[in-house]
Image (cartoon, grey):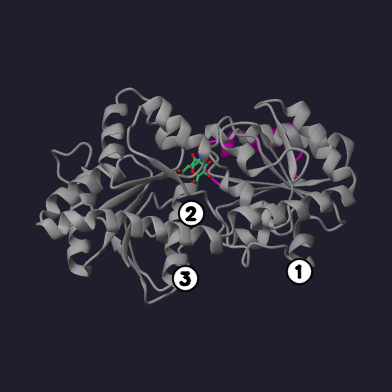
Amino acid sequence: MKIGITCYPTYGGSGVVAAELGMELAARGHDVHFISYAVPIRLNSVNERISYHEVEVAAYPLFDHPPYTLALATKMLEVAEENSLDLLHVHYAIPHSVSALLARMMAGPRRLPFITTLHGTDITLVGSDRSYLPITRFSIEQSDGVTAISNYLRDRTVREFEVRQPIEVIPNFVNCDLYKRTEDRSLRNRWARNGEPILMHLSNFRPVKRITDCIEIFALVREKMAARLIMIGDGPDRGAAEYLVRKKKLSKDVFFLGKQDRVHEILGVGDLFVLPSDSESFGLAALEAMACEVPVIASNVGGIPEVVTHGVDGYLFEPRDVESASKYALEILARSDRGRAMGEMARANARRRYCSNDIIPRYEAFYAKVLNAGAPALAAR
Ligand code: GMT
């Protein structure tokens, strides 16, 4: 198949999923065309089946807000025509599915179906802003196929948007051959020379992630035992988190690594992953940690309970309850055999339910279903 993929290319789970999906599809023999304003994060594979098409938005003094949605629609059509794309697959509804809808309309008799994958804040935050709701609902309903990355997100979309369109749940996935325990001790020694346990967090540091709670949880753990905290990523709340680290005199124990490309290697030395978000439709970073045999403590919100099983491969706590979170952290870290056993369960569960080898064929099957559904209409033309 020839597939056009659009996503937010900068830091964020939906861009990661789109990039990983494109690379996996290319490895399975499909031609993948990324259409976006920057090269998607983690798109690091050089492959003749992967192309990148940059969307440039013309600046003009009249445009206080350059019309990206229109530039994207134009580029989608251009790429589709030049490369005979079979379909477009957009990640994050706003505004990508509106652009795809315009591209499909402009394509005229040449059929250009599009699939929208819902990721989370496109529905839970942005989509619920009343001003965006009608157009989000319209573009979802106009999609030739819609997927959501968790049951929670599917149910919430149906409930709040009252969409009639069926939504198929195709969960996020992890490449279990790439994401695994890092045996190289030198990487671990970089941060924990004396064998201190390592807590980790990975996100885009937006307010919804509550990264200052990671610091609060770590501070409570640190009162009881030696430990290190590694913060991977960047975003608006980094300054507040760094300030809190200084205030609590933890600068020697907490490392802010910024945005990283090879997160699989870093996660692979962790002993505990911390995800205290206020809201999370899936929690891809938690899954990636689990594949690396890292148990997770996370807030009991959204789609997280579909990924992390309380008491088996991690623990769940009420959002903002840093006291309970720190108790769970200590329970895992104070007994390394318990932590290891939970880590092994975490990898086993990640492999069993979310391995890319099993999930990518579900996207392929969904593409085929959408293409076949359109075939009679095309034949009738
Ligand atoms: O976390 C964010 O705000 C970024 C957002 C995105 O779309 O880039 O992440 C969402 O999609 C991820 C990938 O599917 C999910 O793992 C995250 O749970 C989801 N974030 C939220 O729902 C807050």
Look at mark 3 in the image and give the residue it sits on: 45
Tag on residue 171?
none
Left or right relative to 381: residue 279: right
Q: Earlier in the sequence, mark 1 or mark 3?
A: 3
**Residue that numbered label 1 is attached to:** 184
Residue under label 2: 16
Give the CA distance from mark 1 to mark 3: 23 Å
Residue at the spot 59% in from the left edge and 59% down from the top edge: 355
Q: Position of residue 157 (x, y in %)?
A: 42, 32
Above or below — where is 341 with respect to 358? Answer: above
Q: Quadrant of residue 101?
A: top left
Q: Amino acid at mark 1?
A: Asp
157 or 287: which is nearer to us? 157
Q: Residue furthest top?
A: 130
Q: Please, what is the three-letter code of the amino acid marked with disc 2?
A: Val
Contact flag, marks 3 and 2 (Cβ < 8 Å): no
Is the CB–ligand 1 distance for label 2 below 8 Å? yes
Residue 110 is at least partly visible in this image: no
Q: Secondary structure at mark 3?
A: loop
* Quadrant location of the C terminus in the rendered image: bottom left
Q: Residue 97: where, in percent of width, then height? A: 29, 44
Nearer the observer: mark 1 or 3; the answer is 3
Nearest to viewer (mark 1 / mark 2): 2
Sequence-wise first label, 1 or 2: 2
CA gap, disc 1 to disc 2? 25 Å
**Quarter of the figure that contains the N terminus:** bottom left
Residue bounds of the magenta highlight: 232-251
Res 291 → quadrant:
bottom right
Q: Earlier along the polypeptide chain: callout 3 or callout 2?
A: 2
Q: Residues within 10 Å of mark 1 (few under 14, many from 20)?
A: few
Q: Amino acid at mark 3?
A: Ser
Q: Secondary structure at mark 2?
A: helix
